[in-house]
Each structure stands twice: as C-alpha cells, then as structure tokens.
Amino acid sequence: MPGLAVNVDHVATLREARKIILPDPVTAAAIVEMAGADGVVVHLREDRRHINDRDVRILRETVKTKLILEMAATEEMIGIALEIKPDVVTLVPEKREELTTEGGLNILLNKDVVSGSVRTLQEGGIPVSIFVDPDQSQISLAQEIHADFVEIHTGTYCDAQTEEKRAEAFDKIVTSMRLARELKLGINAGHGLGYQTIKSFKGVCEIDEFSIGHSIIARAVLVGLDRAVREMIALIKEL
Ligand code: PXP
C-alpha cells in the first residue's frame, strides 16, 4: 500500500493571515502523525510566506515519522537542509509570484545546479527526491543525476477540465511511473490530489507515497484534521 505524507503548509498559511502564533503547523504535524500518516511535508519558501525557519527547526525535533522538506535548489536552502537534516529533501521549482508550485522542475534546463544540489545533499546524508512533470525525459535525467526518488506531478491530471484531457494526463503519469520503476527510482506522487482523484490510482502499484496538502487541510477545517487524514488513508488502503 502506498504511504501518505501530509503537507501542513496551509496550517501556516492560516497563521500568517493574522501574523500570530496560531494555528501552529507543529501541532498539526503531531495530529497528522497520530492519525496514521507516514510523513510530514513542509515547503520552506524563499519568501517564508507560510512555513518559516522556526517551524522547520522544531519539526525536526518533534516529527517521529519522516520530515520531508520541499525547497528550491538554492544555496540558502541547501545550507538550511544540511543543518536541519530532514529525512528527505524534495527539490521543487519556485517562483515568487506563484500561488503554489506550478509544475515540475525542468532538470534539463537546470542540470548543473540540480545535479550539484543532489550531490551536496546526498553527501550530507539526505536522500533527494525531484518533483518532475510526468515526462519520460525528465525521469531519465533524474536517474542520470542519481536522484533517489522522483515525485510525479499529478496536478495536470487533477485539474483537467475534460475527460479526454484527464485520460491523456493520467496516461502520462502511469507511463512515467513505469519508467521510473524500471530505472529503480523511488516514486512519489502529488499536487492537486483530493478525495475523488485519489481513487483513480487503483491498481497503479508503482507508487511508494502520495504527498497531499490542500485537500486534506481544506477538509480538516470542516471535519477536523484527525478525521481528514484518516479518511484519506482509508481511500489509499482501497487502491
Ligand atoms: N508535492 C509538491 C512537490 C508540492 O509542491 C505540493 C504543494 O506544496 C504538493 C505535493 C501538495 O499539493 P496539494 O497541496 O495540492 O495537495
């Protein structure tokens, strides 16, 4: 059964709406773990719009499952990761003006920087995942530069407006995952996944872990975080 890592960025988004101390993503992470999640994900952005350095530092001490740090491949972030030592780093592209990560990292365009970052992080004892579009050339490049995992971007599939586009996007995801498995990469999947779209992954046995944030936190506002996580885990169990 694939695992579930829960992204708690949006708990911090709510906190930052008032620039106070509540709600605390550290408390959210503890609830997520008690509800059965396999990991906690946070994205430390250059502009610190939600998660901040204090959160990552405390989470390193309190998370008992696995702390996954999403970050851009910049000198600043690599320095922080080497100091904090998350269990996994996921390299993502980052633009100041975007609402959320908009697509996978283009390894081809940034090959030297990305491969240097992978090497430095791994030398520091941190396994590295690269968030990529479901594109075979990106998957092959990820293997070439010795990434440990790829996280396949599921957003295009989840946001597709027509059946035809949805089917086409899903096909690309499955084909990419098969290639990643052949290349012996670990396989995560995420972005845009929700309580309906997760069901499409029934029978796709290549996935090691889903990374899900917004839909779980959105549901948590209405039903509570513990229940929102448990309901997602129940759906993953049925895949
Ligand atoms: N994976 C990556 C690499 C992301 O950047 C994000 C968004 O922070 C997610 C997964 C989770 O996406 P969502 O919040 O849409 O579930």
Image (cartoon, rainbow, N blue to C red):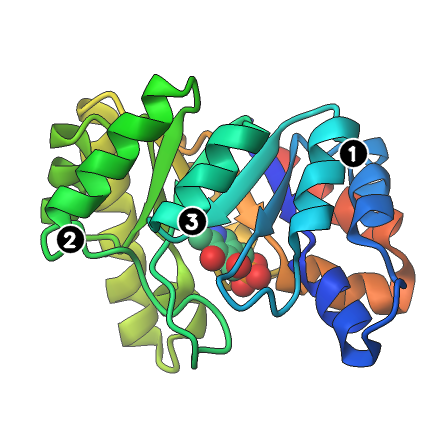
Residue type at tag 3: Glu
Quarter of the image for residue 101 reads bottom left
* Number of marks: 3
Q: Is residue 125 above or below residue 230?
A: above
Horizontal side, residue 65 vs residue 155: left or right: right
Using the image as rendered, state which of residue 202 and residue 55 is in the foreground.
55
On-image quarter of the C terminus: top right
Q: Residue at x 32, y 57 (%)?
A: 170
Q: Which residue is mark 1?
A: 33
From mark 2 to mark 1, how far is it between C-alphas? 35 Å
Q: List x then y, in percent, for residue 120.
A: 30, 28
Q: Which residue is mark 3?
A: 76
On-image quarter of the N terminus: top right
Secondary structure at badge 1 equals helix
Q: List x then y, in percent, for residue 135.
A: 17, 52
From mark 2 to mark 3, how far is it between C-alphas? 17 Å
Q: Which mark is residue 110?
A: 2
Mark 3 or mark 2, which is nearer the start of the sequence?
3
Q: Residue at x 75, y 28 (%)?
A: 61
Observer able to see residue 133: yes
Residue type at tag 1: Glu
Quarter of the image for residue 24 reads bottom right
Observer able to see residue 238: no
Residue type at tag 2: Asn
Q: List x then y, in percent, for residue 142.
A: 19, 37
Secondary structure at badge 2 equals loop
For disc 3, does the CB lie below 8 Å from ligand 1?
no
Q: Is residue 214 above or below residue 76?
A: below
Using the image as rendered, state which of residue 32 and residue 195 is in the foreground.
32
Mark 2 vs mark 1: in front:
2
